[in-house]
Amino acid sequence: MKQLTVVAVLALAFACDRVEPGVQGTNRGELKIALPDAGVPVFETSYGFGDVKTGEQARVTFEVVNTGQDALDIRVIKIMTDDTGAFFVQGGTGSVAPQVRRTFSVTFAPARAGAHTGNLVFETNANSESARIAITGNAIP
């Protein structure tokens, strides 16, 4: 009798842990990016700073939007580039409730003349791939 009880309990435990098909984990937060004056938020985009004098800087404010059903934790916004120090991120990390926007800014402050490129990548708790912004800038003397 005890053996049958154990088997029944194990079967019930496995049935409760069943995951809905097509869903990875429990978070359904979704990050999208709103460019300045661009309208509808998107998952992947690009932004060009244009020409900036060497030693000066240009700053732009972006918004991230949680278009999902659950809270979204933005853990890190990092810049992937070979041009270390040309781009800086300020703000943007933290928890974002569904349908809420959070602002962050990116500064282009080139120390050397020429073209600069990079990608802003967001590390979140969402089940989808990371959102991304390709950024460019040109430093002039």
Image (tube, grey):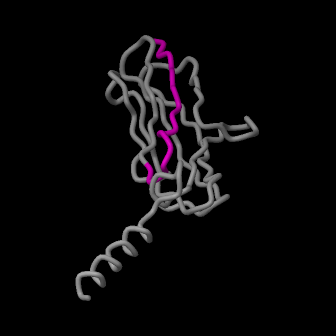
At a point 61% along the width and 53% down the height, the residue shown is: 66
Image side of residue 106 versus residue 2, left or right: right
Q: Nearer the viewer, residue 31 or 113?
A: 31
Image side of residue 110 versus residue 37, left or right: left
Query: Residue 53: x and y, percent?
Result: 49, 19
In the rendered image, the vertical position of residue 18 relative to residue 78, given as above or below: below
Query: Residue 131: x and y, percent?
Result: 52, 38
Q: Nearer the viewer, residue 19 or 132?
A: 19
Q: Quadrant of the C terminus?
A: top left
Q: Is residue 116 magenta?
A: no
At a point 43% along the width and 25% down the height, the residue shown is: 118
Query: Residue 34: x and y, percent?
Result: 65, 41
At a point 44% along the width and 41% down the height, the residue shown is: 89
Q: Quadrant of the N terminus?
A: bottom left
Query: Residue 67: x and y, percent?
Result: 65, 52
The range drawn in magenta is: 124-141
Image side of residue 26 versus residue 67, left or right: left
Image side of residue 123 versus residue 100, left or right: left
Q: Nearer the viewer, residue 51 or 105?
A: 105
Quadrant in which residue 16 is drawn:
bottom left
At a point 36% along the width and 17% down the height, the residue shown is: 112
Please, which residue is most extreme toward the bottom here?
1
Please, which residue is most extreme toward the front here?
1
